[in-house]
Amino acid sequence: MLKKSIKTYAWLLAVNLFISTFTFGGGYIVVPMVRRFFVEKKQYFTEEDLTDMAAVAQAAPGAIAVNLSALAGYRAAGTAGALISCCGAVIPPLVILTVISACYQIFVSNVTAAAVLKGMESGAAALMVDLITDMSAMILKKKSLFLSAMVPSAFIANFILGINVALILFVCCFLCVLQVFCKRRM
């Protein structure tokens, strides 16, 4: 049993170091990577669990990437798994930012470094599109007109009407809670 937990802890540290090192942009960019390792490869939790954890990670204070890694680590190996996952999620950005800060003048004037950063922006954008596509597919699978209408409504509210994202999130959460409450009363 102890050997299995040490193996699990080592895997958690390694996978979170990998995810944190190669997912520039943070936030929801880590979700496809967490899906690949925790849901598809190890089956520690389901796709729906991941969506719920991503929502909690966003609502909780702190960086979404660190919060999500803590939740995934907790689901995989309890409190120790959460602590190990947090360390794995924080170490790469800390090291990278330390190196960049120490060499700031070199990075700011280097054309190659600027091009690499632009390429990373494109990769982050592609991962976000993949995430949005997957989340929308999950919503459509529920076959709920209410939830299916909420996605384009939220998009229109923010990008066309310019309504603050925090207000949109609050209204969507309120409407979903209201829907659950009304369904339970029936």
Image (tube, helix red, strand yellow):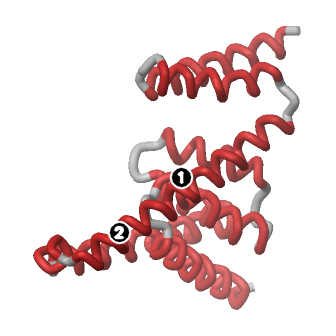
- Tag 2: residue type? Leu
Q: Residue at x 58, y 25 (%)?
A: 154
Q: Position of residue 171 (x, y in %)?
A: 55, 18
Q: Is residue 141 above or below residue 146?
A: below
Callout 1 crowding tier (Cα within 10 Å): few <14, some 14–19, many ≥20: many
- Tag 1: residue type? Tyr
Q: Quadrant of the C terminus?
A: top right
Asked which secondary structure carries label 2, the reply is helix
Asked which secondary structure carries label 1, the reply is helix
Q: Nearer the viewer, residue 22 or 120?
A: 120
Callout 2 crowding tier (Cα within 10 Å): few <14, some 14–19, many ≥20: few
**2 vs 1, front mark:** 2
- Please give left or right for residue 158 compared with residue 137 in the image: left
For mark 2, what is the residue?
A: 117
Quadrant in which residue 35 is drawn: bottom right
Q: Is residue 146 above or below residue 31?
A: above
For mark 1, what is the residue?
A: 28
Q: Residue at x 42, y 61 (%)?
A: 121
Q: Nearer the viewer, residue 92 or 5?
A: 92
Quadrant in which residue 173 is drawn: top right
Q: Position of residue 58 (x, y in %)?
A: 50, 43
Q: Position of residue 20 (x, y in %)?
A: 47, 71
Disc nearer the start of the sequence (2/1):
1
Q: Is residue 168 above or below residue 35?
A: above
